[in-house]
Structure formats: C-alpha cells, structure tokens
Amino acid sequence: MKQGTTILTLDNGYHLWTNTQGTGDIHLLCLHGGPGGTHEYYENFAQKLAEQGLNIQVHMYDQLGSFYSDQPDYSDPEIAGKYLTYDYFLNEVEEVRKKMGLDNFYLIGQSWGGALVQMYALKYGDHLKGAIISSMVDNIDEYVTNINKVREEALPADAVAFMKKCEAENNYDNDRYQSYVDILNKGYVDRRQPPAISHLIRTMAVPVYNEFQGDNEFVVTGKLKEWDVRDQLHNITVPTLITFGEHETMPVAAAERMAQTIPHARLATTPEGGHHHMIDNAPVYFDHLAQFIKDVESGNFDE
C-alpha cells in the first residue's frame, strides 16, 4: 500500500486527508478524537510499534470537518443535519476502510474515536481482527459523573461554583472560566503538554466539537449526551483492548466493567497517563498495545 499522504474522494464529493506509515502485513486504522480533533497523536505509532518488534502499517486520517480534510459549511442547517450525526461518522469509517482496501485489520479509536470503534465493532465487526478502545466509555452518564468529581477534587469550591454559574448562563467565553478549563486540561487531558503537536492556530474543528461535546472536555451539552451502548456491548465479539490513563477524564471503573462485559476483552491502564496517555506515558502505552496485537496475531489472546 502507498506510503505517505493520499487524498481520498468520498462518494459524497468531499475529500479526506489520509496518511500511511510503516510496512508489513498487519494493518491498524486509527480514529482520532474530538470529534473535530486531528490524526496527529498517531503519527509515530508505526515507529513505536516497530520498536516493539511489529511490522505494521498504520493508517490515519482526519475525519470530515477536521483540520486537513474538507470542512463543510456547517452553518447551513441542511449540511449540518446530514453530516453532524453518529451515522455519518460511522459510515465514513466503513467507506475509508473500503477505499483503502483494508480487511481483517485492527481498529483503534481515542476518545470520540473509541465511540466509533464500539459502533463499528457492533455493525461491521466481521471486518476486524481486533479492536482497541482508548479512553472512551460506553455511556456518557458515568463520564459526566467522573468529570464533575475530577473538577471538585482539582479546584477550590468557589472555582467549581463559578464554572457551574457560567455553564448555566452559557457564558463559556469568560476568561476566568477558561483559565479553570486550562488547569483541568493540564491535569487530566494533556499532562505532558507536548510541544511537538502544537500549532500556531487552533486545529480543533469547533463546529463539530461543539455539536457533539460542547465547549470543553469538562461539560457535555451536545449530542454525546445521548451516548449509551451499555446494552449492546456484549455483542462485540472480536478481541478487544480497552486502554485508559489512570489520571484522566474517563472513569477507570467504567473501563473495568466494559472489560467484563465484552466477551474477549482486556483492560490495560497507564500510570501517570491522562486522556492522551499515548503521549503522557508512551513506553507503557505502546507496550500494552504491542502485546495485545502480538497475542492476537499468535492466537494467544484468550490464554
């Protein structure tokens, strides 16, 4: 398969930026978070997994609306209604798989991408060799409970009260409010604050993020309020790795329950890792990921 960047033309006429790194017969397709984030924390996955002894092709792309791919005019209600949906992004994964010629492959998703992995495994699991759910719960209620607990532990009571007041008033642009969001992000999302993926402008696709999440990682006002696949999770039959940071926004207790519910699942947690624990503690993260792939490849996953 061609290495480097390829622009895919979707059946709807829009274009997606894709990139392939690495060589070998094992294929890993990567789904970024946000929604509205970018592929960038996957850029070194082929290198890191090669260091673990795996010859693997890592395929990444920016979802529609995200930084390097086409960005529809979501201010048009018809366009927003058509493309800012769970079904659109799930079907986009399947179209990307077909256009890249992938089958019997591994699918990894971080955060929102982990929600897509769960939906894909439920609908299109026959195409998967293995699934990796990275930092994503199977329902939003436990996430909301956890982020409220996180900020109550991390911030003074008056700061939490001020944040709740701003949220009630829809006053997210308040400088003081955003300063508290920055504190929480540094403690639970990007603990290492990596300069390597910094940009001079904001890369988040704000319309997409706002539609599903809301203003920030510590409040959910968008469509993700609906997210709940708890009653379906037992139908995921492929070998599954659930990987969470031990100091992040997503509750590890939910991950433990998910690992018990999915018939062939393993939970691996990353010490000192936040929501982006592939950066916060890369050696442990990649050791877990590589061991999972090796065990599936050798037929030893369930042993």
Image (cartoon, grey):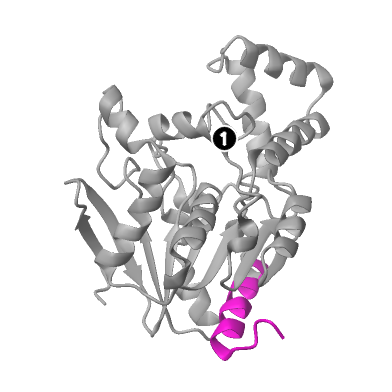
Measured as percent of width and height from the top left, residue 147 is found at: 71, 35
Question: Over which residues does the magenta segment extend?
Answer: 284-303
Q: Is residue 245 left or right of residue 172?
A: right
Q: Residue furthest bottom?
A: 298
Position of the C terminus by quadrant: bottom right
- Depth check: give the residue in front, 182 or 287: 287
Q: Is residue 93 above or below residue 154?
A: below
Q: Is residue 293 magenta?
A: yes
Measured as percent of width and height from the top left, residue 74 is found at: 30, 28
Q: Is residue 133 above or below residue 193?
A: below
Q: Residues within 10 Å of mark 1 (few under 14, many from 20)?
A: few
Q: Is residue 18 visible?
A: yes
Which residue is pictured at 68% across the width and 57% down the height?
244
Position of the N terminus by quadrant: bottom left
Q: Is residue 130 magenta?
A: no
Which residue is pictured at 35% across the width and 43% down the height?
66
Q: Is residue 269 visible?
A: no
What type is the residue that disc 1 sits on?
A: Glu
Q: Which residue is mark 1?
A: 226
- Depth check: give the residue in front, 120 or 22: 120
